[in-house]
Image: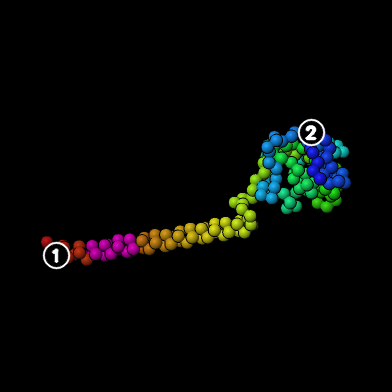
Amino acid sequence: METKETMGDAIDLTGDGGVIKTILRKAKADAVGPTENLPLVDVHYEGTLSETSEVFDTTHEDNTIFSFELGKGTVIKAWDIGLRTMKVGEIAKLTCKPEYAYGTAGSPPEIPPDATLIFEVELVACRPRKGSSIGSVSDEKARLQELKKQREIAAATKEEEKKKREEAKAAAAARVQAKLDGKKVHGKGKGKGK
């Protein structure tokens, strides 16, 4: 059941009034949205408490981007639900009931546990996971192992070079010593010959 999203309409995304979405700025017609292959999203947002309109969190002050992967439970439920319906360039207001926000457990100290939160979210970009083809977790592991291997090789090479340098130093010192010793002996001999 696809709801046709238009500007300014309040859309109940969860069917129980838990997450209400209102589009503030529509995306361009050809804009992409998050998918299985583009699960990483970059967002700008501002969060306010609906009771007091007090801003408790925002990326606008320092103009940072917040990035996370959808569907991993790393953000509040309302974001996982709401951002799936967005397209790049869209700005939407998400009104989140406590059970779709922080609920009673784990809400930050500045947010009352039973607070309804309002987020103004702009979807800036969606990206694939790093180096992503499907099975990216094993890809990522392989990449890290490869890096580790390269580091180990580099470290071993360094050790090897250090050893060689030390050996060369020791050999050079021995040669100098031999020369000095040789000079003493030769010196005497030469002196006699003259």
Foreground of the two, 104 or 84: 84
Magenta residues span 171-184
Q: How far across and how far down the image is residue 53, in percent?
A: 83, 36
Q: How far across and how far down the image is residue 21, in percent?
A: 81, 40
Q: Is residue 192 left or right of residue 59?
A: left
Position of 54 relative to 159 (above/below): above
Residue 64: in magenta span: no
**Residue at position x 32%, y 64% in the image:** 174
State the SS at label 2: loop
Judged by depth in the image, the label closer to the viewer, 2 or 1, is 2
**Residue at position x 75%, y 39% in the image:** 121
Q: Earlier in the sequence, mark 2 or mark 1?
A: 2
Name the amino acid type tagged 1. Answer: Lys
Foreground of the two, 147 or 168: 147
Report the quarter where the C terminus lies. Answer: bottom left
Q: Is residue 179 left or right of residue 53?
A: left
Determine the CA span between mark 2 and mark 1: 110 Å
Q: Quadrant of residue 171?
A: bottom left
Name the amino acid type tagged 2. Answer: Met
Magenta residues, dominant SS class: helix
State the SS at label 1: helix
Query: What residue did someone put label 1 on?
Result: 192
**Residue at position x 16%, y 63% in the image:** 190
Q: Residue furthest left?
A: 194
Report the disc number at residue 47. Answer: none
Other residues around mark 2 within 10 Å, as few (<14) / some (14–19) / many (≥20): few
Report the disc number at residue 7. Answer: 2
Can residue 17 be seen from the camera position used here? yes
Other residues around mark 1 within 10 Å, as few (<14) / some (14–19) / many (≥20): few
